[in-house]
Image (tube, helix red, strand yellow):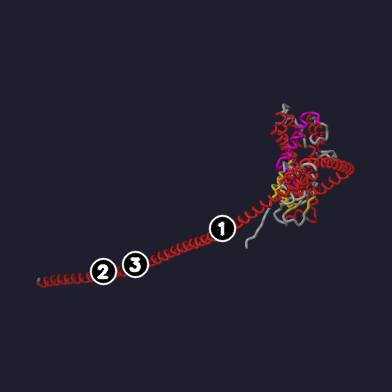
Amino acid sequence: MSNLLIIIITALISVAVTAVVAYFINNTIKKNKASRIIKDAETEAENIKKEKILQAKEKFLQLKTDHERHINEKNSQIQQQENKLKQREMQLNQQNQELQKKHKENDSIRENLKAQLEVVNKKSGEYDQLKKEAIEKIENLAGMSAAEAKEMLVESMKEEAKTQAMSYINDVMDEARMTAGKEAKRIVINTIQRIAPETAIENAVTVFNIENDEMKGRIIGREGRNIRALEAATGVEIVVDDTPEAILLSAFDPVRREVARLALHQLVTDGRIHPARIEEVVEKVKKQLEDEIMETGKRTCIDLGIHGLHIELVKLVGRMKYRSSYGQNLLQHAREVANICATMASELGLNPKLAKRAGLLHDIGKVSEEDSELPHAILGMKLAEKYKEKPEVCNAIGAHHEEVEMMSLISPIVLVGDAISGARPGARREVIESYIKRLKDMEAIAQSHNGVTKTYAIQAGRELRVIVGAEQVSDAEAEVMSNEIARKIQNEMVYPGQVKITVIRETRSVAFAK
């Protein structure tokens, strides 16, 4: 029993000792772990602190750099403003010096002119006195007054001038009768020679633009087959030359040129260019253009309120869209004439619908497919008669250029309407050569007078400035010269509107202060 008790006590003591030892060991381990965690946290905190300090330094440096750059920019702007102000100040100082210099020069010129004026006034008084004395001496010698002598001289000169003028007029008229026919032919031939190239180019050539010059070879085709097929199908001569990115379509018929242009456009867009395809496209385009021509004619008649027009006349009206005269589209011209004629007929109490009809059809002879040598007015009248238009309309068409006798009141209305539409500013282009010639002729007329030093045609020929010498021409003679130049221009030249003639007579005295 005692041994058992000893064993139990011993076991309890062992357990107690073991527990105490375990407690101390565990406590030691926890202290070591806590110290290690604390050490790691301190290390990490130190690293974070260093990183934040570096970031703060970088931010500070960046802000410092930005601030310095901003300050430099401001300083640069301020410097530029200062330079501009200094430059402006220098300019103002220079201008002030120049103004002062000019003031001094003006004062000097003013004093010089004043002195010269005093001398002139003195000389003028002396001249008047001498003139008076000379007149008195002449009157005493002649036995008549100056007024009587002047009147006698004027009458004598009038009679002599009349005799010479009549003789000159008779000679000129005789010469004109002998040379009028020959001179008229010469003028007409020269005119045709001068305007024929511009007119031919304007009315017979269409430019077809292409993207590149490689397409020219495809349009020509192997051995020229494509271009020959296109010319045969359209009746248009196609000119392929060195002009970059352009082909010329030449023909007098504008409808044929339009067919060729549209066919070329479709062929180039499609890319298939060969003789069979060309014939197919040309036929298709012809049908489309005929439909468009007819549609244009119908639409024009509907817009103008014209009804009952023959289908062939409607077609001719549509063809006007592709014809121009002196740069003016023929269809637009016909519409303008129709509206003008209708308005004038209404104001005069006539039939406005009949006048509008005649105005629309007055130029159909220009687009006729018939190959006739008749003037377009006569040809248009015959076409209107052929398609059963009223006699008043037919006569107005034929008489709008006074080639037949006017038989109705509508005829002069159409003539006037045609003239108004053609004379509208900008309706027809004026050839630059004729414009320059008109200015030169105007200046030449003024230069033909004695005492003229310089002439200037200004404001597109609306005003003529003539400068005459003060010593050769007096004030009264300058006034007479302006009237003579105006009358001569009016009689010898053709011009739009009116021309203002200004004759300038002045005396210039120049002196130099050194």
Residue at image location 44% in from the left, 63% down from the top? 70
Q: Is residue 455 above or below residue 393?
A: below
Residue 270 belongs to magenta span: no
In the picture of the structure, the residue carrying the numbered disc 2 is 34
Q: Earlier in the sequence, mark 2 or mark 3?
A: 2
Question: Which image quadrant: the N terminus?
Answer: bottom left
Q: Residue at x 90, y 43 (%)?
A: 178
* Amino acid type, label 3: Ile
The range drawn in magenta is 406-433
What percent of the width, then of the height, locates residue 329? 73, 42
Disc 3 packing (10 Å; few <14; some 14–19; many ≥20): few
Residue at disc 2, secondary structure: helix
Q: Which residue is mark 1?
A: 99
Q: Position of residue 271 (x, y in %)?
A: 71, 52
Q: Quadrant of residue 213?
A: bottom right
Mark 2 or mark 1: whose residue is earlier in sequence: 2
